[in-house]
Image (spheres, rainbow, N blue to C red):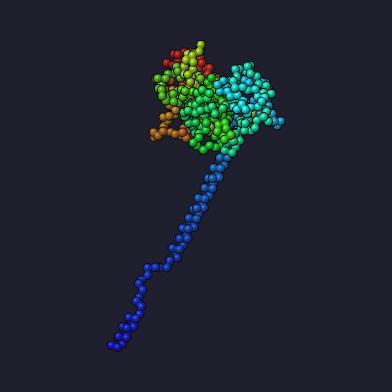
Amino acid sequence: MPGSLATARSLAQQEPPLPPSHDRLADPDDIVISVGVIVGLAKLLLVVWRVVSMIRSDYNAQKEQHKQRLKKAFTHGENLQEDYEFHGDGLFKAPETADSFTTLLDTMPAVLRVPSMSLPRDQRDENDEFDDQPRKSATSHRVSKQHLPTRSSLTPHESMSHFVALGEKFEMKGLRPFRIDDSLLISDELVAKGSYGEVWRGRYNGATVAIKTLVSTQPQTIDHVTVFVNEIRLMVDLHHSCVCQVLGASWQPSGDIKMVMEFMPRGDLTTHLAKTTPSSCGWDDKVLLALDIADGLAYVHHRKVIHRDLKSRNVLLCDRAATAEDHARLGAKITDFGLSRTVKEDDENASWSCGVGTYRWMAPELFLNSRYTSAVDVYSFGMILSEMDSHQVPFWNTRTPDGQLVHDIGIMDKVRRGELRPKFSSSCPEWIEQLGMACVDMKPSLRPTAEQIKAILLLHVADSSLFE
């Protein structure tokens, strides 16, 4: 018994056993798997970084390439003859004759002419004989070399021969005769908005005008400003009853630039066709619109200009007054020369931009990275004839074999391969269908010229039976 008690007392003094532990030593396989996951994630991050770098590099390269293409494509501003320019001797170079300079100024409507390039009277040169009264004619006010302001008499800010936008300087010397006073320009109502430009109905000196500006709510690029300036330079030199007339331009040192045009209250051809039907708007009316478009296009081509974006949206409508040869009717004028190009005689080796325009109106050669001519505008005219027939945009109901609508990219591909051409309805006069199909021939050399189209329309316009 004494031994048993001693043993029990000894056991009682011993520490109680620890509870079983749930921890265990890490398995070597687990360690290998964790290291593998980390290495895999690192490799994945490296691949993502390389892909992002490649995309960024490719984007920068494409951006630079696009900029270079624009510089080559929109060269019409360089082709226009400026009426005077700065020379090293600090003087303006006068035109060859005083009459040529005066005639240029007189192309602006009287209500929109601003004397002395919009400078306040107290800032004008003392030898500047421009007065506040509009010029009556080229013979009523002659401008000689001594009447032109000298460079020394105007500070750079006062002369306003340039403006700065997005850190780049834009020369405006050739547009100085067309500069109007921005303080008298009032924008009333937004009437149209595009990808980079918007058009407002406004007033200037009591006259209703259209004011085109860059979209104020979107960030602009140097390309946008360059295209806009070149469009103004081109359009101020076009004067035809079937081309929308530019009345002047306004620009500020801050880069705010506006183009002022005649206001066309009847809207564009796209809207007109959408609001009417083939039965309510017959070919006896539509052929006269087509004649106006062909007339304007023939003039543009005569001036060595390719429009490159001719479509119903870029045809504005107006009311034409009755004349001895014609009754009062709805007329048409071509507008929006933002993508246009002036063709120079030495353009044999020049590069040409492809993919320019709006897909459904673009000629197939514009997709093929090849040289093209004014025949691309003739193709677009043929598409407008198909619009006049259907009162719908071209290829509006083109579908795939399973019934799905074909979108712009698919249409572009089919047109490029010659698999898609416009169709005319059975109610369309046969000769109009033949003319339209000739305009959209796959071979540009087989298409009629704008002058030939105009002659064909004039030949048929007097015979009303042809529209029945």
Placement of the C terminus among the 4 image quadrants? top left
Residue at 51% across, 32% down = 197
In the displayed orientation, state which residue is furthest to the front. 122
**Residue 376 location in percent, x, y?**
54, 27
Relative height, residue 456 to residue 356 (above, below):
above
Residue 326 versus residue 18 in the image, above or below = above
Q: Residue at x 46, y 58 (%)?
A: 37
In the displayed orientation, state which residue is furthest to the bottom.
2
Q: Nearer the viewer, residue 51 or 141?
A: 141
Which residue shows up at 55% across the image and 25% down it? Answer: 246
Identify whether 2 is placed above or below 278: below
At horizontal 53% and vertical 23% (from top left) the residue drawn is 205
Instruction: Give the residue furthest to the right.
Output: 89
Whether residue 382 can be seen here: no
Total residue callouts: 0
182 and 13: which is toward the camera: 182
Q: Nearer the viewer, residue 45 or 82?
A: 82
Q: Quadrant of residue 371?
A: top right
Is any atom of residue 404 visible in this view? yes
Quadrant where the N terminus sits is: bottom left
The spot of residue 121 in percent (x, y) is 61, 26
Residue 413 at x, y percent in the picture: 48, 34
Name the image quarter holding residue 343: top right
